[in-house]
Amino acid sequence: MPLNLVLLGPPGAGKGTQAKKLAATRHIPHISTGDMLREAVAGGTDIGLRARAVMEKGQLVSDEIIVGVVRERLAKADAQAGFLLDGFPRTVLQAQALDTIVAGCDRLVVVDIAVADEELVRRLTSRRVCSQCGTNADVPAPGQSVPAQCGRCGGALTQRADDREEVIRERLRVYARDTRPLLDYYRNRPTFRPVNGAQAPEAVASDLAAAVDDAEAKAGGEVA
Ligand SMILES: [Zn+2]
C-alpha cells in the first residue's frame, strides 16, 4: 500500500536527515520543496520558469507556484507508490491544496517531529563549520562542549552569521507562528502523529518508523 507521508518539524529538529533515511527504508521518493523548485526550474516547465523569475528577483515563491510545483512532482511515476514530503505544506492554504491533489489516493500520514525551543536554540547555536575544509561539525549532545577544531583537518571551526542566537530565536518565532495553524489543521486527524525529536537521532528514527506504521494501519483501516 502506498505511504503518502508529510513530515513536519522546526529548524534544528533533524527533519532532513530523518526524511532521507525513512524514504530510503520505505523505497519512496524524498521530496523537499527546495528539490522540487530546482527540478521544475531545471526542467523548464511553465511553473518552473515562473518560479525562476520570482527567485531571480529575490522574492519568495508564492503558495500558488509551490502548489503547482508539488502537483507536477506528485504526478510523476515514482510518486504513485507513495512519497515523503519535506518542507511542504508550510501553510494551511498549501495543506488544503495538498488534500485536493491527493484526493482519491490513500490518506495522508502526517508526522510532526517536535522539539522544545530551548533545545533547538542549543543545537542551532552549537553548529560549527570548518573554516578550512567546509565540513560541518557534529552538533554536541546536551552537556558536551562545542568543539573548537575540525575533526577532519584540524582547522578552526566557526559559526555562521545566521546561527547567532537572536537570528535563531527570530527564525523559530516565525516558524511557530506559521506552523501552529498547520498543526491545528492536521492535529485531530486519526493519521496524525507527534514524535519526540529531543532524543538521539537513532531513537527519533525508531519512534518515527513506529509512528508511521501505526498511522498507516489507521489510514488503511478506514475508507477515505
Ligand atoms: Zn576541516
Image (spheres, grey):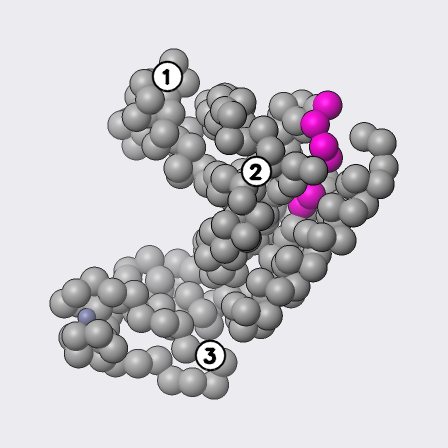
The range drawn in magenta is: 104-110
The residue labelled by disc 3 is 141
Q: Nearer the viewer, mark 1 or mark 2?
A: 2
Q: Nearer the viewer, mark 1 or mark 3?
A: 1
The residue labelled by disc 1 is 45
| Quarter-of-image position of residue 124 | bottom left
Assess whether residue 203 is covered by the magenta stretch.
Answer: no
Spatial CA distance of label 1 from label 3 is 44 Å
Tell me the amino acid under the disc marked 1: Thr
- Identify which residue is drawn at 40% across, 72% down: 139
The 10 Å Cα crowd at callout 1, few under 14, some 14 to 19, many 20 or more, is some
Residue 125 position (above or below residue 33) = below
Is any atom of residue 111 visible in this view?
yes
Assess whether residue 105 is covered by the magenta stretch.
Answer: yes
Spatial CA distance of label 1 from label 2 is 21 Å
| Quarter-of-image position of residue 161 | bottom left
Q: Are marks 3 and 2 in contact (CB under 8 Å)?
A: no
